[in-house]
Structures are given as C-alpha cells and as structure tokens.
Amino acid sequence: MGTALCKRLIREGRPVRGTFVSSKAHNSISTGIEPVGMDPIGPATDWTHALKGVDTVIHLAARVHVLHETSLDPLGEFRSVNTEGTRRLAEQAAAAGVRKFIFMSTVGVNGDNSGPKPYTENSEPHAHNPYSISKYEAELLLRGISSKSGMEVVVVRAPLVYGPGNPGNFLSLLRIVYRGYPLPLLSVDNRRSLLYIGNLIDVLITVLTHTASAGQTYLVSDGADVSVPELIRRLAAALSVPARLFPMPAQAIRFFGALSGKRSLVNSLTNSLIVDISKIHHELNWTPPYTLNDGLRETTDWFKKEVLR
C-alpha cells in the first residue's frame, strides 16, 4: 500500500517523506521520496525527526498478515504495534503541528459476517480477532487525541485489499486456483466486498485533499460485491485455467475448517461481508475509478508475470 501510494503522490508532484525500518534496506522507498530510517513501530518509537515540517500523516503500517502466529500473546503483540504504536505516532504528530492524520483501519472492526445487509459507518462495532480489536482501539485513541489537540483524524475501513504484489490469503487463493485444486465451494451463496489497491490509493488521495473528510470514518470498496464461487470463476478465467468447484454444504465446510484450525479462513470463504460506500460517495463525491474486473485483471497479469516466472 505504501509503495503504491507514494508513487501516486510523487507523480502528482507532492513532497513525500517515507519511513522504513533502519535495520532493513529501504529498497521499497520509491525514487523521489525522502527516506527516514526508524526503529520498529511500538509504544516507545521516536518519530520526532520524521515529523518535522510534515502537514499530513498517512498511517498504513501495521502488524498484519501473520499467517503462522507463534506469539503466546497475539493480542498483546497486535496492540503493541497497532494500538500503542499508533498512539505514540499520533501524539507526536499532534505535538509537531501535523494538520491531518489519515488512519488505515479494517472492516473487521465492524465484524466478519455482515449477512445480507451491508455494514455502514453507523453499524455497531464488533471487532472479532486480535488484529481488528487492536485497530478499533487505535481508532478510539485517535478520536481522543484529535479532540484534545485539534488534529484532524480520518479513518478508512477497508475489506480485503488486493492487487499486484498482494500478500496473504489472496495470493494463496491465486496459487490454489492456478494449480487447479478442487474447491468445495460451489454451493456457497454469499457476497463479499473487495478493494483493489488502485481504488484504495484514490480514496487516500481523496480524503487527503478534501476538507469535508476531517473527523470522518469511511467504509470503502470496489462498489461491486461478488460471491466466492464467482470470484474463483473470474480468477480462473483470467488465469486461463478451469475453475474446479464442487458442492458441499457450508455447514460442513465450517465444521472441517474448525477441525483443521482454519476457522477464520473458512469464515472468509463462506460468510458474507459487504459494505455500503454511499457515505464517501455523497460527502466526497468519490466513485471507484477501477471496476472489480479491472482490478482482477491487473492482479492476475502481475501474478502470471512475476509469481509464475
């Protein structure tokens, strides 16, 4: 996300300062960006040198995509980075005179199963795992810091973000579909909202530049929801492979998922999780510039070129 956003900002002629962990090479920092080495994000990170002269902070970094958790206290680890790390950054940003703080959150704050009715910004929060709990707690902390300091805070809650370079479960799904593994998902009748990276970057630029975004929370997506079987068919078609789907009751899929310790993954394949993006459309006049098919095509083209080579 950070790399894609910085490239867009640089193309638009905006001065950008990008942070990276000092102990690692900053190869991900795009040309034209002022790189600033930092200690890992946590409750004691010193951001003062990175924040000097900065007008807006866009906070995308987080502990996420932990596919094989080894910590004995996962919630504590997520809180250290995503909650207390965000608090530290926001407090120092406010002290440095930063005007606007844009925070990348997750639709998981609302829950992991919307049912047939989409989540909205007014839906009751129901953070369901350590990651989403840590993000919701960070949102609450940011509101408190904003009320005390006057720094404008904008929260963007996104569903699964996909696109060229995507890690995590979406990349795993691409591999599974390409390799032709049979999937027992033909009978799944659900709807999922997704967010292409190009649409996410456009959202971030919009809330960055629009004065009406101050103090708001926005749910965002590609604006076109899709069932998991249909998503697999579209991916298979783009990859020029057959979609190998066979029927199995969703209850049975969830049962075997629980037995194998994959409850969260199975829920993401069988539950509905849809969001209503009408608020950001009406308030900021934002419409996704890329369709779902645009995003899937760009992603599968990247997969064939970079992952399968």
Image: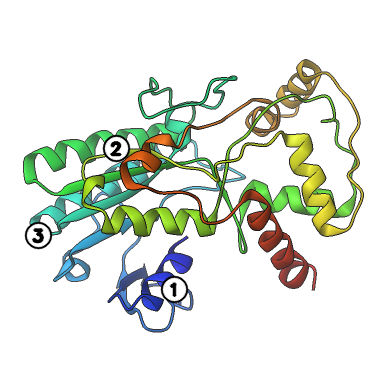
**Which structural element holds mark 1?**
helix
Mark seen at residue 139:
2
Is residue 303 shown left or right of residue 27? right
* Distance Cα–Cα, label 3 vs label 2: 20 Å
Foreground residue among 284 and 38: 284
31 in relation to 41, above or below: below
Disc 1 vs disc 3: which is toward the camera?
Answer: 1
**What amino acid is at disc 2?**
Glu
Q: Give coordinates of residue 154: x percent, y percent.
A: 27, 45
Q: Which residue is mark 3?
A: 97
Q: What's the residue at 16%, 57% (across, down)?
A: 93
**Which structural element holds mark 3?**
loop
Is residue 65 shown left or right of residue 209? right
Is residue 187 shown left or right of residue 196? right
Disc 1 vs disc 2: which is toward the camera?
Answer: 1
Q: What's the residue at 44%, 34% (across, down)?
A: 132
Location of residue 46 by image quarter = bottom left
- Dot 2: few (<14), some (14–19), or many (≥20) neighbours within 10 Å? many
Mark seen at residue 159:
none
